[in-house]
Image: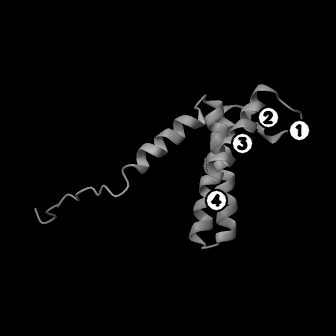
Amino acid sequence: MTESKKILEELYGVVTDRKANPEEGSYTCYLFDKGLDKILKKVGEECAETIIAAKNKDNEELKNEICDLIYHLTVLMVENGLPLEDVMEELDARSAKIGNLKKMKVVDRNT
């Protein structure tokens, strides 16, 4: 198991545990308590902040925003009952396609 996969599994486990065993003062529990709309709002905010950091070419900020986005996506996965393993399997399947170039359609823009 790669170290990054282990980290994602640990994060998913902590978020899952917070949903099952709420702890007062936990930000994760706060998100679950507020529901899907709040979680989606946070995912959207983190997406926008990631885009801005990338546009500004600020890799330190970009790194932090990507981490925030991954965390909030994990909360969304747990809220929707989407197992991390399903996502990892899909990533594995997609990685098998790397190098399979698609042929570009030739479009006659003059007609």
Residue assigned mark 1: 25
Residue 54 in percent (x, y) is at 58, 67
Residue situated furthest left in the rendering: 111
- Callouts 3 and 1 close, C-beta under 8 Å: no
Would you name the residue on which mark 3 appears? Answer: 10
**Secondary structure state at the residue bearing disc 4:** helix
Could you tell me if the residues under marks 1 and 2 are in contact, i.e. CB atoms within 8 Å?
Answer: yes
**Mark seen at residue 29:** 2
Residue found 57% across the figure and 61% down from its top = 51
Q: Amino acid at mark 1?
A: Gly
Amino acid on which the number 3 mark rests in the picture: Glu
Q: Earlier in the sequence, mark 1 or mark 4?
A: 1
Whether residue 33 is visible to the viewer of this picture, yes or no, is no
* Residue at (61% x, 28% y) in the render: 81
Alpha carbon separation for disc pair 1 and 2:
8 Å
Identify the residue at the far front of this view. 1
Mark 2 or 3, closer to the camera: 3
Q: Is 56 rendered above or below residue 36?
A: below
> Local crowd at mark 1 within 10 Å, few (<14), some, or many (≥20)?
few
- Amino acid at circle 2: Cys
Which residue is under mark 4?
A: 49
Q: Nearer the viewer, residue 48 or 25?
A: 25
Residue at (65, 31) in percent of width and height: 79
